Amino acid sequence: MIISCPSCKKKFDIDANLIPKEGRNLQCGSCLNVWFYKFERSIPDLETKDNLNNLQINDIKSENKEDIKKEISAKKKIFKENRKDKALVKYEKKTKLTFNSLIGYFIVLLISFVALLIVLDTFQAQLTPIIPNLELILFNFYETLLDIQFFIKDLIK
């Protein structure tokens, strides 16, 4: 269940079982605001497993015991399907790669590569015995960057 802080409007995912019917005080982890929250269940017998197991007979309109059992099993099935759907949606949100996330990964990769080159250039004298021809490799890389820069400038003109 998602609850928003009334002060800073930050959203939090909270387990519905942690909030009793009477409500409780919550504290925002971001702005430290404390407020009283009362959870109103829209479909009480489908929200929690306890409510599902404690179905009242007067909630069910049928008088036949077989019909009652069928209705209870149907409600349990609906409850399980809703839980599976919610779990799938959460999984899809976590694993879905978007264009923005790919650009973010590319930028992180680029920054990491540049940081590696800066470290190699800074400690070039100490790393030359370990990595032969390091000076030549760095020089070729810098020349390649200049060529790319000239190419982009020619494209813009």
Image (tube, helix red, strand yellow):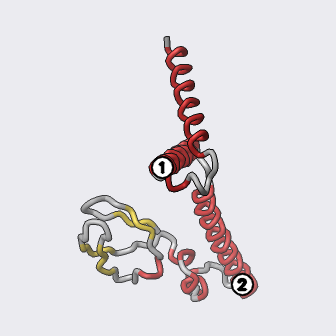
Residue at point 71%, 80% (across, down): 73
Characterize the local packing of mark 2: few (<14), some (14-19) or many (20 or more) Cα atoms within 10 angstroms. Answer: few
Describe the element under mark 1 as helix, strand or loop: helix
Residue type marked 2: Lys
Rendering quarter of residue 139: top right
- How far across and down, in percent of the image, does residue 152 sit? 53, 21
In the picture as drawn, the residue positioned furthest to the right comes out as 66
Q: As displayed, is residue 63 above or below residue 144? A: below
Q: Are marks 2 and 1 in contact (CB under 8 Å)?
A: no
Which residue is painted at 61% across and 80% down in the image? 60
Residue 147 drawn at (x, y percent)? 56, 24
Give the residue type that dot 1 points to.
Ala
Residue shown at the point (58%, 59%) measured from the top left: 94
Q: Is residue 65 left or right of residue 114?
A: right
Q: Which residue is mark 1?
A: 115
Mark 1 residue crowding within 10 angstroms, few (<14) / some (14–19) / many (20+): few
Which percent across, then down, holds residue 113? 54, 47
Residue 55 - label:
none
Give the answer, above or below, for where 120 lies relative to 72.
Answer: above
Residue at 49%, 51% (x, y): give it: 125
Image coordinates of residue 110 in percent, x first then y, are 53, 44
Q: Nearer the viewer, residue 65 or 16?
A: 16
SS of the residue at dot 2?
A: helix
Q: Nearer the viewer, mark 2 or mark 1?
A: 1
Q: Viewed as shown, does residue 10 lie left or right of 69?
A: left
Badge count: 2
62 lies left or right of 49: right
In which quadrant of the rendered view does residue 31 lie?
bottom left
Q: Which residue is mark 2?
A: 69
